[in-house]
Amino acid sequence: MPVSGLVLLLHPDQPLSPLLDALERHPDLMIAEPVERRVPLVADTRDAQHDKEVWGWLRARPEVLDVAVALIHDDSRNA
Amino acid sequence: MTIDSKPLNAFPALPEMDRREVVRFAALTAATGLAGSLAASASAQQTDAPPRPEAPEIDGVEWNKAPCRFCGTGCHVMVGVKGNKVVAIAGDREADVNKGLLCVKGYHVGSILYGADRLTEPMLRKNGKLEKISWEEAVDIAARKVMDAGQGFGLYLSGQSTIPEGYIGQKLMKAGLSNNHIDANARLCMASAVTGFISTYGVDEPASCFDDLENCDVLILWGNNPAEMHPVLWSRVIDRVARGEKVKIIDIGTRRTRTTEHADMHLSMQANGDLAIANAILHILVKEGKVNEEFVSKHCSFRASHNAEGLSHPLVHDEFTARLAERGAGGLKGTAIDRKDFEELIDYYTPERCSEMSEVPVEQLRELAALFADPTLRITSLWCMGVNQHTAGTAMNNMIHNVHLISGHWGRPGDGPQSLTGQPSACGTVREVGTLAHALPGGRLVANDGHRADCEARWNVPAGRIASKPGYHTVKMFEQFSKPTSEGGDISAVWVQVTNPGQSLPNTKKLINGVKAQSDKFLIVSEVYPTATTELADLVLPAAMWVEKDGVVGNSERRTQQWFRMVDPPGQARDDAWQLIAVSRRLFELGHAGLRDKDGNWLFQQLDENGQEIEIWKWDVWKANHFDRNFFEEYRPFTVLKHKNVAPYDLLVEKRGMRWPVVETSPGEYRETRWRFVEEDDPFVGEGARFAFYHSTSGDDRAQIWFRPWEPSQETCEDEFPLMMSTGRVLEHWHTGTMTRRVPELARAMPGTYLEMNRKDAADRGISNGEMVRVVTKRGSMKLPVWLGGRAEPRRGHVFVPFFDEAQPINELTLDAIDPYSKQPDYKKSAVRVERLADPKGGTQ
Ligand code: SF4
C-alpha cells in the first residue's frame, strides 16, 4: 500500500489546464496548490503494480517535464 | 507561464485522521515543502538558502539521514524506520546534492533490503551444492584459504565498498599480507578518468563540482546519458530549462536517448569518433587564433607520448613518435613538447578529416569549436562510462581536459570538466583509499619508495613489508584466476565483496566462468543476494547492506558522506568490514606473521579508554559499537599528502557530506572546497596565483595539454561482424540489477534486457520490433528480443544492449581489450552481427 509524495515539474511551453483537470479527476491522486511550475501531489495506491501504473501515467503526460520524489511510505514488504 | 488559480482538490481537512491519512498528510506536506523549497532555491543565492524543513511526521517512524545506495550522484535520503524496518524514504532537503529530489531508483531504495531471497547464512559448496555452515567455520575456511594461497590470493572490492571497508581491505592486503593483488570493480567504470586526471593535473579527481550545473551556459555531454544514469543531476539542469533559463545542451554519442530529447544539438558520431571530435576542436581553436593565450601561457604545458606500451597512430605520426621515443619518457608521464610541436601535430586534424573519422558533419564540429572559442560562455562537460570504457579512455579523458584548458574554459563556476561516477563510492573508496593494485591510501603508489615507507610507518609495520611491484589489475587478476594452474594461472583464491564480477566483467566466459570447473581454485563471495558470482562461489558469506551497517562513502564531486546503522541485517548476515576483520583475526591466530605489527600486536587492534583490547572480531562486540569512526579517523591523516583532506568523522555525522579538501579555518571550524586549484576557493592556492595545479607532473603548477592521436578501435566492423555493439545501463536498474531486480516495481517496469537497433538497420534485415534475434560476436552468441523506436535509438551501424539482466548476461560477448594506461576494458565497441532466427519468437535454434 504505497503512499508517495511527488512533485511534478511542468513544461514551460505546454498549456496547464488540461493537466490540472486530469490530475483532479484521477482517483488515486490528490494535488496541492502549485508552486510556480511545480505541482505537489500524493499518490495513494493499492499495491506496487498500481503504484507503477500511476507513475507511468504521470510520466506519459506531455506537460510533465520531470517527476521528483519527496517521500515514499510502504510498510507492506516483508522485513 | 502562469498557472490558473482555480480551486484544486487539495487535501481535505482531517479532524480525525486515521493512520493512512496521517501518512498521506505527511506525503503531501513533504511534496509541498519540496516544491516550495525548490522554487525558493531557484531564485535564492547559494549563501541565501531557503529555510530547512523538518523530517515528515509519521506516527512511530524515526528518521535518519543516509546517502542513496545507488549512483555516484550521492543524493541524500531521509530513511524512515519503524519496528526495525525501513518503511519510508524521503528526499533530504538539507542535502545540497539533491535538494530533496530523488529519482525512481532512490524512490525505491528502501525496498532493496527486502527481496525474498536475501542470503542469510554462510554457505560452503560441498559436492557441487552450497550448504549452510556456521560463521566460525566460514571464517576459519576463508582464513586458511587466504593463508594457503599466499601471493596467489586476490581481494576484489568495489566502488560500493564503504571507505572503512576499503581501508581495512587495503591494510590487510598491503600491510598484512604483503600482497598487492587487490583491485576493485571501479577499474571497469572509471579507471580511465583517474589516469586522465593524473596525467593532466598530476592528481586524481575533479577540480569542479555539481554547482557547475546551475552556473553553465553550455552543457556538453560526452557519451553521457544523465537523464537515465544520473537523473537527479539531470533534474537540476531541466529545472533551469523549465524556468526559462538558457542552457545550451549538446549531446555527443552513438545513440539518441532520453537526454537527447532535451538537447539543442546532437552530434551523432560513430563509435570511436570522440577523439576525432575533440582533435577537431583543438585544430580549429589553434588555426583560428582562439587559444586563450593568457591562460595557456601561465597555466599549461604541452605533452605527448610515444606510447611505448600502448597504441600508436599508424598513419601520420610515426616520425614524430620516433622522435619522442628518442627522448625517453613514455607511458602516463609522456614527454614535454613545445607549443610549436603541438601545433604541428594538431595540424593533421582538419575538420574535414575529423568529420570522416567521426561521421559528424563539419558544420557541427565548427559550431562546437565556436562555443569553446567564445570566452564569455561558461561551459561544463560531463562524461562517465561512455568515455572511460574505451581502449583510448585515458586519451579521451585528456582530450576533454584539453579543450577546456586550451580555451581557458576552466576554473570559473559553470566552466570546466566534471567527470561522473556510477557507484556511490568509486571516488571515496577506490580512488581515495586506493583499493587498486598499484595504489596506497591518499594518492600514494606502491612503486614509490617514499610512499611505501610512509605507509609502513603509519601502520607500524617493518620496513619492506609493503611490496613494491603493483599487483594484478582486474582483468589480469581474473585472467590468472580462471586460467588453469598448470597453464600459469597463478591466482588460486579470490575474495569478492560488494560486487558481481560473474556478470560485470567483460568476456565472462574467458575471465571467470571457467573457475567453477577447477578444483584447485577457490572463490569466496560476500553478497546480499544470489548472483551470477555466488553461482560460481565455493564459500558464500551473507552480507549486511546499506543502512543495516554504518558507512562512509565519497561521491563524484569529492563529497564524503556518512550514515549510521538503522536496522538489523537479516538472519546471520554481517557487515563486510566485520568479515574482513574476523578473517584477519583468524589469520593472526593461525600465526600469519604479517598480521602482527612491529610491536607484535594484531594489525587491527583497537583499545578501549582503559587500554584494554576490544574484541572487535566478535560479532556481538562489533554490532554493539560503531567502529567506522575508528577506521575512518585512522585513515584520515593519509589524505593530507595530496591535499585531499577529508572532514573529521564527527563533522560528517552532522553534515550532508563535505567536499574535500576540508580545512580547519579556526579551532573547530571547517570549510569545504567547491573548486580546486582556484585561488578564490582552494585554500592551497597561493595568494595572487589565480590558478595553481600544485601537483603538476611538470613541477611548475601547470596542467598538461596532451597531444592524443585518433586511434582505431580494437575491434572494427567487417563483413562478418558489420555492427558495433555497446553495452550499458537503463533508468530502472542499477548495474547488474542484483538489487533493483528485487524491487517488483522496477523489475516489472524493465523485466529483461533487449537489443536496441536502428530502425533502418532492422528494416534492411527484415527484423521487426519484439522479434527474437541472435547477436553474434567473436566470443559467442545470445538470443535477445529487438526493441525498435523505444526510449532510445542507436545510429545506423550500431546496436546497444543493457547488461543488468542475469538471465541474458551480455558480457559473455563483450571484448576484453583494455586501455594501455588505465587497464579499463572497452565495453562500448564489440563488433557483432545480428541474425534472424528461423522461428522469430526464438523457439528453435
Ligand atoms: S540520482 Fe543516483 S543517488 Fe540520486 S536518487 Fe537516483 S540513484 Fe540515488
Image: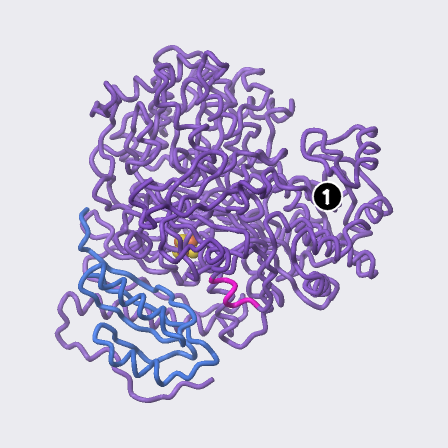
Q: Colour of chain A?
A: blue
| Residue at x 33% of width, y 54% of height | B750
Task: Please report the bounds of the magenta region as a residue range.
Answer: B258-263
* Ligand 1 visible in quadrant: bottom left
Q: With respect to residue B115, does B750 lie above or below?
A: below
Q: Residue furthest front?
A: B838
Query: How many residues crowd mark 1 within 10 Å: few (<14), some (14–19), many (20+)?
Result: many
Kind of residue at disc 1: Pro
| Residue at x 19% of width, y 46% of height | A79
Query: Residue under circle 1?
Result: B709
Q: Colour of chain B?
A: purple
Q: Is residue B607 left or right of residue B43?
A: left
Q: Provide the secondary structure element on which disc 1 rests.
A: loop
Pick the residue in front: B98 or B704: B704
Q: Is residue B31 left or right of residue B641?
A: left
The picture quadrant where one finds residue B216 is: bottom right
- Whole-percent x and y of residue A50? 22, 64
- Whole-percent x and y of residue B27? 27, 67
The picture quadrant where one finds residue B309 is: top right
Q: Is residue B602 magenta?
A: no
Q: Is residue B740 left or right of residue B418?
A: left
Q: Is residue B323 left or right of residue B751?
A: right
Chain assignment, label 1: B
- Whole-percent x and y of residue B655? 44, 53
Whether residue B674 can be seen here: yes
Q: Residue furthest right?
A: B340
- Whole-percent x and y of residue B212? 58, 61
Q: How many marks?
A: 1
